[in-house]
Amino acid sequence: MKELSLHLLDIVQNSITAGATRIEIGITNSVSQDLVEISVKDNGCGMSEEFVRRVTDPFTTTRTTRKVGLGIPLFKLAAETAGGEFKIASEVGKGTLVYASFQRSNIDRPPLGDLKGTLITLIQGAPKINIVYTYVTDRGQFILDTEEIREIMDGVAINEPEVLNWIGEFIRENEAELAAK
Amino acid sequence: MKSIAELKEIREQMQSRINMRKEEDEGIRVVVGMATCGIAAGARPVLATFVDEIGRRNLQDVTVSQTGCIGVCRLEPIVEIYEPGKEKVTYVKMDPEKAARVVSEHLVNHRVVEEYTIGAAE
């Protein structure tokens, strides 16, 4: 994966496959703390303790459990290569939390990349899931909550191109606003 | 800065059009593989191109959806097109330029772009 945003897209696809109805995505992009964090918390079906232990090992994946596959091992590797850490916690019936941190200035840290593209792709594919996206920098934060947007659209699908466009612009403007000077 | 009020405007503009669409039956389905293999190979911009082009051309009977691994990871990004009454068409090793061409040739003019299909690649 060339960008962290692609890892994010991949990890959230797991949440969708796990039947989540609410997914909280958190991004920290802090120069002062020299830190990039990505977290994905869902209320999907969760995993057993035994499965969580195996999930970061690419070779335990079989075709029938392909929904896990290489995504998590690759994400873990990216974090650990860039001076960060990877954590996963899950409970059957409750959901899963995936967390990865990166040393921001580390030469091996991939760029965050097109986060807007990832969010739009997710909303396009799963318009009925509540996605709460929080982006934090040293200068502040912004939150995108698809439930709010769905309420305003009142029956019009939020994955119509016009709406996706608006969401994309909203993310782009806020991200630019919060970028380090 | 974008405001929520703009979103309300978009809603007003779209309402009538959406109601019209609900009446329609099965249209064409475009399915993009969005598993680890697809994402790593560049499926995200391919999907974005389909959504943009279909929106821009206002193709009312076409829906775009995502799926997991289609099974031929080395040929990703893969796009499948289902048209009622016709055989499924599988496009492989897609990129945004190819996606734009598939929209204009296949979705608009109903001509399969043979050179991008899995049959041509294998």
Image: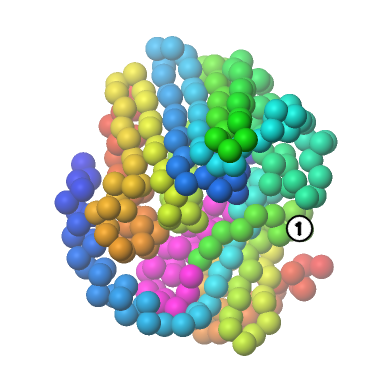
Tell me if residue A164 is in the magenta stretch: no
Question: Where does residue A18 sit, x and y in percent of width and height?
Answer: 60, 45
User: Residue visible at 40% across and 12% down?
Assistant: A32
Q: In this rendering, is residue B102 above or below B87?
A: above
| Quarter of the rendering occupied by the C terminus of chain A | top left
Residue at mark 1: chain: B
User: Residue visible at 41% across and 19% down?
Assistant: A30
Question: Where does residue B30 sit, x and y in percent of width and height?
Answer: 56, 69
Q: In this rendering, is residue A158 above or below A22?
A: below
**Is B111 in front, or is A158?**
A158
Q: In this rendering, is residue B18 above or below A116?
A: below
A157 left or right of A124 in image: left
Question: Where does residue B94 sit, x and y in percent of width and height?
Answer: 63, 61
- Can residue A10 be seen here? no
A170 left or right of B77 in image: left
Give the magenta-colored segment's residue range: B41-63
Residue, disc 1: B71
Splitting the image into 4 quarters, where does residue A95 fall?
A: top right
Tell me if residue B52 is in the magenta stretch: yes
User: Residue visible at 61% across and 53% down?
Assistant: B34
Splitting the image into 4 quarters, where does residue A137 fall?
A: top left
Q: Amino acid at mark 1?
A: Gly
Majority secondary structure of the magenta segment? helix
| Quarter of the rendering occupied by the N terminus of chain A | top right
**Is A61 in front, or is B76?**
A61
Q: Residues within 10 Å of mark 1 (few under 14, many from 20)?
A: few
Q: Residue furthest front?
A: A93
Question: Where does residue B35 sit, x and y in percent of width and height?
Answer: 65, 50
